[in-house]
């Protein structure tokens, strides 16, 4: 053992305590569990024994009650008793009959040594015959065995006889004449109640050596009976004169009377002493039988076991202490040697070794220490070589950073510069000048949002920012950053590379301008294409209208050449001649009239042909002019939509609620949609707050998208009808509040034809339309897109051909304030 080191210091004390704890704790646990198990076992056995005794006593008592009741009924049915009672009822003073009757009752009473007296009551309740002549003549009409005995067999509860002072019971039975079933009287047997004491408490032994103790198990066991008034009706082992005086309102008695259930357990008896007992209910008499033993006597064996267990545990603890001291010493000495060796190795003595004679785990630990010392020495030499190599690589990397053509820097987790290469001199700064300063100090207008993107982004980022050099010149810079984390995943720094893209930005502006000119040319080509169709139709309708107009005009010219006026004048002359009677020649008159009629028929036919030509061409002329008007309106709408697209109106912002806005729209169009066999499903989020928006423009967006959805559903229903497939059109419009993003989502979903992947990317382009009916301008979604953008929102579309389309509109809750 090493000098200056005691067993009860440091690890020695801990080992000793652990050995002691791990040894003593199981002993105490086992002893405690054994004690509890023994106590519970004894308790259960005692409860079973008490219950068994109680059941035996109960059966014995029931046998006595049955025997007494049977005896009363048997005596009452005796023909001698019945005949002599009937004689006394007619002649009570017949002493000869009384003498015979009394003698016979004495004979009956002597049949059972526990019968005190047998007597007979006449219908008036007077004792007319008895085994005890002193009872004859007593009037007991108010006694319960007479009152209840008239109606049938009756058992009177325990009572103290007024004349003898004896504890008694009474068994009564009515005496009935066989013929006519006439009531003659009541027969009563007074029973010796001390018989119950012998059953419950046992016979007293008068032997002097026993001192009059009762024959029951142990010194504290007793059994007794309680009547319905909670009073003892048998003697007590601990109380004198307890019959009908000692009240017993204990737990089992109360439980039995209240619930009618038998009871077994540990409780306080009438003395207030804890006992183990069993209770049985004699329902017939409303008695409770209790068999009890004091808990102190019942648990005496386990108490004796407890004391023995404590003695054994004490002996074991002393043995464990000595064993722990011995084992701890054997473990501590090698460990202390290892501690001294580690101190020498830590001091730099890498050649130190510990002698080892042990073959156990501590011996292996000592061998491992010696090997570790050897490896430390070898590793130390390798580290020195590695240090030289790292210094060379450090010089190489510093050269790369110094002469790099890009600005390279490091930030800490808070965004402060910790390193920056000499490239910063091109910006007018020195390296040390920026160390410790925050990144935001180099950004134009202190753009905090961009700094947050760099510092708090979950992965590498490439961000375009505007930076300011020392001369306050604004530079366009592309920042490429990567987050550096330790093994625990904690951010320890940010590596960044900054590229000056000011010149590249200028080139981009030029390219954007060129692309804008190309877009304008494309837009003009689209306008020309869209306007060419309606203008061609208008030209066709106009030329046809001119041709019809010439035809109608020529028809009118031909109608002017008809000789209607001449024929009319000729007809007037003929009529005047007829009136004057100057038309003499009848043949000439008939020829003239025939000529006029023929001419009028020809003119009428010519007029009818003219009317037919005009009517026919008038219909076509109206059709051509109406078509020209429609195409003109289409051109106007096309140009109006183009103007709206080219110069989006500034929205008139006001507080509105999206749910109410959509609900108002659906109340107007839902009826029409249902006519098209399309069901509208509302799915509104009740948490939607009011927000700033131009309600008329947002309404236009919702109507545009809903109308497109309805068209797609109708096309899908037509396709399903052609394929003889039953399908129901469903348009779902819902809202959702994204509290984390402070935005409102409007979702418009249909189960229509859907949009193929190729067309989905072009739906927001001007003049693009997938409608084949020629009624689409291709500007609805483009205008909607512009309206949503002016509200600082976004619009997304998801679709699959044949599966339907879903549009999602996102509007910020904190919108622009009204002007």
Image: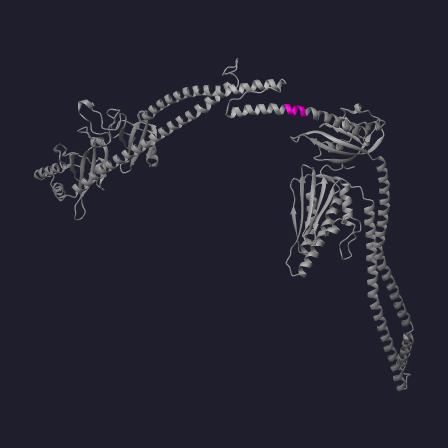
Residue lying furthest top: 4
> Can residue 123 be seen at all in this image of the molecule?
no
Q: Does the magenta stretch include residue 584?
A: no
Residue 571, x across and y down, in percent: 89, 78
Horizontally, residue 274 falls left or right of residue 127, namely right
Answer with the quarter of the image where residue 120 lies: top left
Residue drawn at (86%, 73%), measured in percent from left and top? 607
Going 34% across and 25% down the picture, which residue do you hit? 305
Q: Where is residue 259 in the image (x, y as percent from the top left)?
A: 35, 36
Return the residue nearer the eye: 9 or 527: 9
User: Image point 89% across, 86% down: which residue?
Assistant: 587
Above or below, 108 relative to 20: below
Relative horizontal placement of residue 529, taking residue 54 as reference (left or right): right
* Front residue (pair 103, 486): 486
Q: What type of secondary structure mainly makes up the magenta span?
A: helix
Q: In this view, does 231 lie above or below 154?
A: above
- Residue 538 in picture, x, y percent from top left: 85, 59
Question: Which span is picked out in magenta?
Answer: 377-382
Residue 810, horizontal then vertical, whole percent: 71, 42
Q: Which quadrant is the C terminus positioned in?
A: top right
Q: In which quarter of the image is residue 299?
A: top left
Q: Quadrant of residue 678?
A: bottom right
């Amino acid at each position: 053992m090493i000098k200056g080191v005691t067993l009860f210091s440091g690890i020695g004390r801990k080992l000793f305590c652990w050995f002691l704890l791990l040894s003593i704790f199981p002993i105490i646990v086992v002893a405690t569990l054994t004690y509890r198990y023994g106590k519970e076992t004894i308790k259960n056995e005692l409860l079973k024994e008490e219950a068994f005794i109680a059941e035996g006593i109960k059966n014995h008592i029931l046998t006595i009650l049955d025997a007494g009741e049977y005896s009363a009924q048997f005596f009452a049915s005796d023909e001698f008793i019945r005949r002599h009672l009937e004689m006394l009822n007619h002649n009570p003073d017949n002493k000869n009959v009384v003498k015979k009757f009394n003698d016979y009752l004495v004979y009956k009473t002597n049949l059972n040594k526990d019968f005190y007296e047998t007597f007979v009551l006449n219908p008036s309740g007077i004792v007319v015959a008895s085994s005890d002549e002193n009872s004859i003549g007593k009037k007991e009409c108010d006694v319960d065995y007479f009152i209840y005995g008239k109606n049938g067999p009756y058992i009177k509860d325990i009572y103290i006889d007024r004349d003898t002072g004896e504890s008694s019971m009474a068994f009564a039975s009515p005496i009935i004449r066989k013929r006519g079933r006439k009531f003659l009287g009541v027969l009563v047997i007074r029973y010796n109640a001390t018989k119950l004491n012998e059953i419950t408490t046992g016979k007293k032994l008068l032997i002097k050596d026993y001192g009059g103790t009762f024959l029951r198990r142990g010194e504290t066991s007793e059994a007794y009976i309680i009547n319905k008034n909670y009073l003892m009706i048998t003697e007590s082992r601990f109380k004198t004169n307890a019959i009908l005086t000692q009240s017993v309102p204990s737990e089992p008695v109360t439980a039995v009377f209240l619930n009618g259930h038998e009871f077994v357990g540990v409780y306080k008896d009438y003395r207030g002493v804890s006992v183990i007992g069993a209770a049985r209910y004699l329902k017939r008499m409303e008695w409770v039988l209790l068999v009890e033993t004091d808990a102190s006597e019942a648990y005496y064996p386990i108490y004796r076991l407890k004391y023995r267990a404590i003695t054994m545990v004490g002996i074991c603890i002393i043995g464990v202490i000595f064993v722990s001291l011995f084992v701890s010493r054997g473990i501590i000495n090698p460990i202390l040697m290892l501690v001294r060796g580690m101190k020498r190795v830590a001091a730099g003595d890498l050649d130190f070794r510990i002698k080892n004679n042990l073959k156990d785990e501590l011996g292996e630990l000592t061998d491992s220490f010696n090997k570790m010392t050897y490896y430390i020495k070898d590793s130390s030499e390798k580290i020195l070589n590695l240090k030289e190599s790292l210094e060379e690589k450090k010089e190489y990397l510093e050269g790369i950073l110094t002469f790099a053509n890009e600005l390279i820097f490091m930030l800490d987790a808070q965004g402060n510069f910790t390193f920056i290469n000499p490239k910063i001199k091109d910006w007018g700064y020195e390296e040390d000048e920026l160390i410790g300063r925050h990144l935001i100090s180099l950004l134009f207008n202190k753009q905090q949002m961009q700094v947050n993107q760099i510092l708090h982004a979950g992965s590498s980022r490439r961000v375009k920012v505007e930076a300011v050099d020392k001369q306050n010149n604004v530079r366009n810079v592309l920042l490429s950053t990567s987050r550096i984390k330790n093994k625990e995943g904690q951010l320890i720094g940010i590596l960044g590379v900054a590229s000056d893209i000011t010149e590249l930005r200028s080139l981009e502006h030029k390219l954007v301008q060129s692309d804008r000119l190309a877009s304008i040319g494309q837009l003009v080509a689209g306008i020309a294409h869209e306007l060419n169709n309606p203008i061609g139709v208008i030209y066709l309708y106009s030329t046809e209208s001119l041709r019809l107009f010439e035809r109608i005009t020529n028809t009118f010219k031909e109608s002017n050449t008809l000789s209607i006026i001449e024929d009319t004048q000729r007809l007037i002359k003929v009529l005047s001649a007829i009136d004057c009677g100057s038309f003499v020649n009848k043949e000439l008159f008939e020829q003239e009239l025939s000529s006029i009629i023929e001419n009028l028929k020809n003119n009428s036919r010519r007029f009818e042909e003219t009317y037919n030509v005009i009517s026919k061409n008038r219909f076509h002329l109206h059709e051509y002019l109406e078509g020209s008007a429609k195409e003109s309106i289409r051109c106007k709408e096309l140009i109006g939509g183009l103007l709206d697209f080219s110069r989006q109106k500034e929205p008139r912002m006001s507080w509105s609620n999206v749910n109410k806005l959509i609900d108002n729209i659906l109340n107007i169009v839902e009826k029409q949609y249902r006519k098209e066999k399309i069901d509208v499903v509302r799915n509104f989020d009740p948490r939607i707050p009011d927000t700033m928006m131009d309600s008329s423009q947002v309404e236009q967006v919702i109507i545009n998208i809903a109308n497109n959805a309805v068209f797609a559903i109708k096309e899908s229903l037509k396709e399903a009808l052609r394929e003889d497939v039953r399908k129901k059109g469903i348009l779902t419009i819902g809202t959702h509040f994204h509290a984390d993003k402070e935005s409102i989502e409007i979702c418009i979903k249909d189960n229509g034809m859907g949009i193929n992947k190729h067309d989905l990317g072009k739906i927001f382009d001007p003049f693009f339309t997938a409608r084949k009916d020629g009624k689409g301008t291709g500007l609805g979604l483009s205008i909607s897109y512009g309206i949503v953008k002016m509200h600082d929102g976004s619009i997304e579309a998801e679709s699959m051909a044949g599966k339907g389309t879903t549009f999602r509109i996102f509007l910020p809750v904190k919108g622009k304030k009204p002007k």
